[in-house]
């Protein structure tokens, strides 16, 4: 610290003389910056999208960590408690080490398999990645502990693996339901600009609206013919500009995603130019594929000398996958029939108390390869319902070959309840065990319905019909005939055992909601 006297001396000190040297300013061309060489930066809309994606990933990361530490910790605690009476001094350290390493490997593989990637958020592939990552993590951990001759991995396999896997899938399912509610409210959603010709843009918007995931909100369209408009489900969309200026319009509309429904005719370089335009303005460019209703697992990208070829696996209707499906059917049907045997006396009593006649209703249905089989149901109509069909035929509310009547006078009061919660379908597990049906599959048609099929519709009969299926979880009787056929054909070509399990889980919720059942 300087004193007042020192400050006075410093204040009166003269500055040193500086040499008279003239420093010239650098040429203008050395300080100018070429604007075309500056890398694009993110705009506010793109940053907002990245922000909510990071927030959701952190939510998943926290729940995954809690489940992994909790399940592996429980397994280690049980092991330590079981051998506490042996008084092994190094037991807590030994099993504690196994707990820490198992949890670390598990969390590492969940990250390596990109189970929290924005590309899988809210999609079925998320569950598959979690299962693959978990299986690989415990396989690697088991091999490592066997090589090191370390104790404690067996308890982790028997307790932590099933407990943690079920818990992670449950928390992921809960998170997806939460995300969907947020998206319905307008949060955590991608704002999309759809570009292309009129027909393809209409198809994309209609598909996004019926998707049910609410992942995209269409904020605008750009059609190949300027100053035109389209109408989709009563909503009017006006083209906001030209296909050559997509990035500018995406920024003005606050769109973080661009969906290219179709490219301008004869312009092969359009997609490349569009990706360059969207740098810093959008998070993703999605291309609508002409391969309608072909599931992702059947498609793979194979670049050949700069030519990106999309390979599509041709569906097969026999072989190992179908044997696995049959084994799954037998296992589930065997367990379900135990429950059916318990409830049958009560259902039979209710049916008998209201109307005379048999408890079960046997109806011919068309199964795989067009073969007819007798399908079992609990009787939900009066005994002479088939003879009364001509009296209500003109009241048909169904579409296509289907006959549906919301308030069918032939249905009994007990039958209305049985149909509402699909209890009348329970005896069909016997059909599954006999091999006539599958747990999951297309709806089993009546012979008179198949006589009205068009050529493509017959593909529904390439596999066994199911007790439940995509039609069951997508609206049931509310679906149009065309939509029902489309869902069934998509299932026939793209089914998987994992997909069947997901349909079963969704069926439970659909049955309890009792929507579209009559």
Image (cartoon, rainbow, N blue to C red):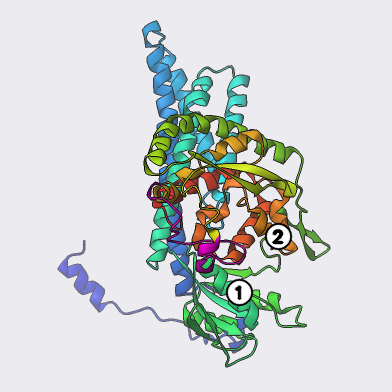
Looking at the image, residue 48 lies above or below residue 386 = below
Q: Decide whether residue 496 is among the magenta residues.
A: no
Q: What stretch is highlighted in magenta?
A: 390-414
For the N terminus, the image quarter is bottom left
Secondary structure under the numbered disc 1 in the rendered image:
helix
Residue at image x 63%, y 83%?
198
Residues 211 and 363: in front is: 363
Residue 44 image point, x, y percent: 45, 74
User: Taking the image as drawn, is residue 399 in sight?
Assistant: yes
Residue 390 image point, x, y percent: 55, 62
| Residue hosting label 2 | 451
Residue at image x 43%, y 13%?
90
Residues 254 and 93: in front is: 254
| Residue hosting label 1 | 203
Q: Are marks 2 and 1 in contact (CB under 8 Å)?
A: no
Secondary structure under the numbered disc 2 in the rendered image:
loop
Residue 339 image point, x, y percent: 46, 31
Residue at image x 48%, y 42%?
169
Sort mark 1 into few (<14), some (14-19) or many (20+) by Cα contacts within 10 Å. Answer: few
């Amino acid at each position: 610290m300087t004193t007042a006297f020192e400050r006075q001396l410093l204040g009166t000190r003269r500055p040193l003389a500086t040499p008279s040297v003239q420093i010239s300013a650098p040429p203008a061309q050395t300080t100018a910056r070429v604007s075309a060489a500056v890398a694009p930066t993110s705009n506010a809309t793109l940053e907002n999208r990245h922000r909510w994606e990071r927030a959701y990933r952190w939510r998943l990361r926290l729940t995954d960590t809690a489940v992994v530490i909790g399940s592996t910790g429980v397994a280690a605690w049980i092991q330590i408690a079981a051998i506490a009476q042996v008084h092994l001094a190094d037991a807590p350290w030994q099993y504690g080490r196994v707990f820490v390493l198992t949890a670390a490997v598990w969390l590492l593989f969940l990250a390596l398999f990109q189970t929290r990637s924005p590309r899988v958020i809210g999609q079925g592939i998320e569950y598959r990645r979690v299962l693959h990552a978990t299986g690989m993590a415990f396989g690697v951990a088991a091999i490592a502990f066997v090589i090191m001759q370390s104790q404690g991995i067996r308890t982790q396999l028997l307790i932590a693996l099933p407990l943690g896997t079920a818990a992670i899938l449950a928390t992921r399912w809960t998170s997806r339901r939460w995300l969907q509610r947020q998206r319905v409210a307008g949060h955590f959603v991608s704002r999309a600009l759809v570009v292309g010709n009129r027909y393809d843009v209409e198809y994309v918007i209609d598909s996004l609206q019926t998707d049910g995931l609410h992942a995209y909100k269409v904020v605008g369209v750009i059609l190949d013919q300027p100053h035109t408009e389209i109408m989709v489900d009563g909503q009017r969309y006006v083209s906001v500009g030209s296909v050559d200026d997509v990035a500018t319009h995406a920024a003005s509309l606050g769109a973080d995603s661009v969906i290219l429904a179709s490219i301008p005719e004869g312009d092969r370089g359009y997609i490349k130019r569009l990706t360059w335009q969207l740098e810093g303005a959008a998070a993703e460019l999605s291309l609508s594929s002409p391969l309608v209703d072909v599931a992702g697992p059947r498609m793979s990208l194979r670049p050949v000398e700069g030519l990106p070829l999309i390979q599509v696996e041709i569906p097969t209707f026999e072989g190992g996958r179908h044997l696995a499906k049959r084994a799954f059917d037998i296992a589930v049907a065997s367990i379900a029939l135990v429950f059916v045997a318990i409830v049958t006396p009560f259902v039979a009593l209710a049916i008998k108390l209201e109307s005379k006649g048999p408890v079960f209703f046997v109806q011919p249905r068309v199964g795989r390869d067009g073969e007819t089989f007798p399908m079992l149901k609990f009787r939900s109509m009066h005994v002479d319902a088939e003879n009364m069909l001509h009296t209500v035929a003109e009241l048909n509310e169904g579409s296509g070959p289907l006959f549906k009547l919301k308030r069918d006078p032939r249905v009994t009061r007990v039958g209305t309840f049985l149909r509402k919660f699909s209890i009348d379908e329970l005896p069909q597990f016997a059909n599954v065990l006999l091999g006539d049906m599958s747990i999951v599959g297309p709806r089993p048609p009546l012979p008179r319905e198949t006589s009205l099929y068009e050529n493509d519709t017959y593909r529904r009969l390439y596999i066994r019909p199911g007790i439940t299926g995509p039609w069951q979880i997508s609206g049931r009787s509310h679906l149009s005939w065309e939509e029902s056929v489309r869902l069934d054909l998509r299932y026939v070509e793209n089914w998987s055992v994992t997909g069947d399990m997901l349909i079963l889980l969704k069926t439970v919720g659909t049955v309890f909601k009792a929507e579209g059942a009559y």
